[in-house]
Amino acid sequence: MSRGAAFVPREGETLVVAVIGAGSWGTAMARHLALVGARTRLLGRRPEQAAAILESRHNPEYLTKTALPLALDAGVYTEGDLFDVDLIVMAVPSKAYAEVAESLAARIPKNVGVLSLTKGVEPATLRRFSELLQEMWQASTPRVAVLSGPNHAEEVTLDQPTATVIASHDVEFAEALQELLSTETFRAYVNHDLIGVELASAVKNIIAVATGMGDGVGYGDNARAALMTRGIAEMARLGIALGAEPLTFAGLAGLGDLVATCTSRHSRNRLAGELLAHGHSPAEVESEIGMVAEGLTAAPAILRLARSKGVEMPITENVVAVVYEGKSVRDSVRDLMLRERRPERH
């Protein structure tokens, strides 16, 4: 960190944080950081959004009913530098992640801490986002961690009990983030399995799209439970093939986030699947929801990654077929049900 390896600022100074991305999750995390005492700036793309936040203390586009702390600053990440920042929180959509990271590379300090909130893999190169940051920002030697788990922004901003997991190869950094973020309503755990946490966060969104599709055509609890359970098997198969630890997928980033994303009224990915089942195109889905459903971006990328490793992911394969190839949801379910009979295994 620029002011100490464990978030210890110089005497009389406060930790400085820049949250990149002023969507729902970026807004919720910026609010949380401001409330725990960090000097926080919420940086989006549009000056008019930043101006509205400063004037009204509300984000005019996301979590619009959430009052933001007076101490929270706002601006745009396209201007100025971040050389005074101790921690950068990346909360931009996966499709824009590489472009935004590249634009910031020359404007960040040495040894800066980075916490990535984005779920998925980089669509063009199939890199996990921690890998992308380490490569793009290697001249600054950043300390990188990711945050995942059942963390709906809507509930975090209501200060409802929430548990999350922070993963990093740098245990000291992860523990420092744990200390910073933990409150009586937000409990953070540390996990050193960075690969598993990142892949679980990507795959669970795809399974949520599949679950939403089932909901959309009127299937019931049996189908939903089957999709969720076999979805864990898919994410575990891929993760293990890439070096992840199996138990990660039974934790907050795996099972925990999967349950929340497949069942919650807040879940954009579940809703995206439901709208697709009702005949909406991917573009219409995004317009209807007003936010990115990361599962739609992740599905073809994860499928390519799985095929490159010889890993079977039949649910993911059928989500891609429905979303991008025009296959019907009912035909996909039929094909999943009629796959070769085999013993249950992961």
Image: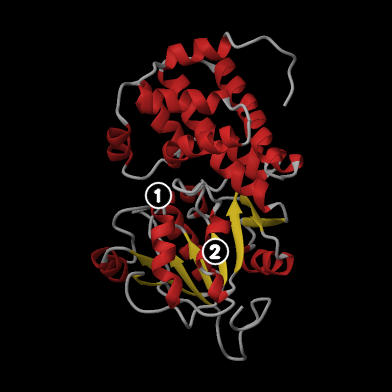
Q: Quadrant of the N terminus?
A: bottom right
Tell me which label, 1 or 2, sits earlier in the chain: 1
The spot of residue 195 in percent (x, y) is 66, 49
Q: Residue at x 48, y 50 (%)?
A: 153
Vertical placement of residue 115 versus 118, above or below: below
The picture quadrant where one finds residue 330 is: top left
Q: Nearer the viewer, residue 30 or 2?
A: 2
The spot of residue 53 in percent (x, y) is 31, 66
Q: Residue at x 36, y 69 (%)?
A: 77
Vertical placement of residue 101 versus 300, above or below: below
User: Which three-letter amino acid code belongs to the residue tagged 1?
Assistant: Lys
Q: Quadrant of the C terminus?
A: top right
Disc assigned to residue 135: 2
Query: Considering the numbered disc 1 on the image, is that residue within a helix, a strand or a loop?
Result: helix
Q: CA distance from mark 1 to mark 2?
A: 17 Å
Vertical placement of residue 90 versus 199, above or below: below
Q: Nearer the viewer, residue 238 or 213?
A: 238
The spot of residue 174 in percent (x, y) is 68, 64
Q: Nearer the viewer, residue 314 or 49?
A: 314
Give the residue at mark 1.
95
Residue 149 visible at all: no
Q: Residue at x 59, y 41 (%)?
A: 257
Graded by Cα atoms within 10 Å as few (under 14), some (14 to 19) or many (20 or more), the crowding at tag 1 reads some
Query: Considering the numbered disc 2 on the image, is that residue within a helix, a strand or a loop?
Result: helix
The spot of residue 55 in percent (x, y) is 27, 70
User: Which three-letter amino acid code belongs to the residue tagged 2?
Assistant: Glu
